[in-house]
Image: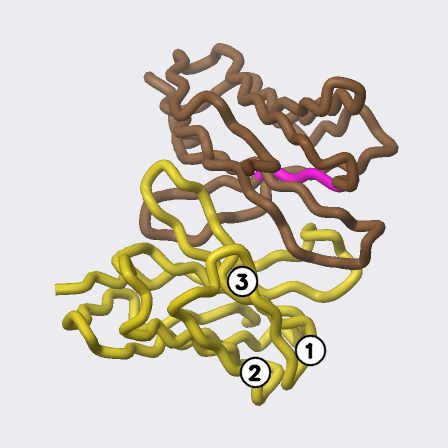
Chain colours: A yellow, B brown
Amino acid sequence: DGGITQSPKYLFRKEGQNVTLSCEQNLNHDAMYWYRQDPGQGLRLIYYSQIVNDFQKGDIAEGYSVSREKKESFPLTVTSAQKNPTAFYLCASSPTGTGGYGYTFGSGTRLTVV
Amino acid sequence: DQQVKQNSPSLSVQEGRISILNCDYTNSMFDYFLWYKKYPAEGPTFLISISSIKDKNEDGRFTVFLNKSAKHLSLHIVPSQPGDSAVYFCAASPLQGGSEKLVFGKGTKLTVNP
């Protein structure tokens, strides 16, 4: 039963703390992505990776960091440098060469800064 | 600059009637377009797509129309059902460029009233 798993579903962070969001896929997809959703803002790309050990900044990468040490995993760290981290975070994966048709999304992590 | 625009944040229709969701884009490099459906606190799911070599693609109750000269696409849902109530995202990809990065619009919240 292949899919993409994000954990935790809800996360609370104190101001000034770093926090890491997990994303794991067993779909054998080469590419993985992190998006952020804010009310009225749609989905904005934070980082993406098309191959292991390589990743690229998206449109709103400031204050975030990622790693891609394994094909299955693409964790996102929200650092204290991110000014407004409260949002819904979505991870996705896709095979290459599908033009976005093959995107599979996780169920998301809602991060709240308290 | 917003490359994919969904100018209507919300749309309300009666059950059984047609729902028409609109999307405009500015980047001429986009040649693959997709619609995703999203329920609250869940990840988006793929609904229907169209490549730039076509002007219409139909899948059951869902039809997507593409007008390349106007850089406009629309999603028609006929007949609309209460279960169609969700946020619909339009997305675009420059498939020819070899990138799987999707650019999303801000979404349109569709409410189908019984």
**Label at residue A92:** 3
Coordinates of residue B74 in the picture (x, y in percent): 63, 22
Q: Chain of mark 3?
A: A
- Residue A8 in sight: yes
Q: Residues within 10 Å of mark 2 (few under 14, many from 20)?
A: some
In the depicted view, which residue is nearer to us: A95 or B4? B4
Going from N to C along the chain, the mark reached first, 3 or 1, is: 1
| Amino acid, disc 3 | Ala
| Amino acid, disc 1 | Ile
Q: Is residue A55 above or below residue A39?
A: below
The residue segment tinted magenta is B31-35
In the depicted view, which residue is nearer to us: A15 or A52? A15
**Viewed as shown, does residue B40 lie left or right of B44?**
left
**Label at residue A68:** 2
Name the residue at 55% across, 17% down: B20
Q: Which residue position is annotated with label 1?
A: A51
Q: Quadrant of the C terminus of chain B?
A: top left
Q: Is residue A4 above or below residue B39?
A: below
Q: Is residue A5 above or below residue B83?
A: below
| Amino acid, disc 2 | Arg
Q: Which element carries disc 3, helix, strand or loop? A: strand
Snapshot quadrant of residue A110: bottom left
* Magenta-drawn stretch contains B34: yes
Coordinates of residue B80 in the picture (x, y in percent): 48, 20
Viewer-side label of 3, 1:
1
Q: CA distance from mark 2 to mark 3?
A: 14 Å
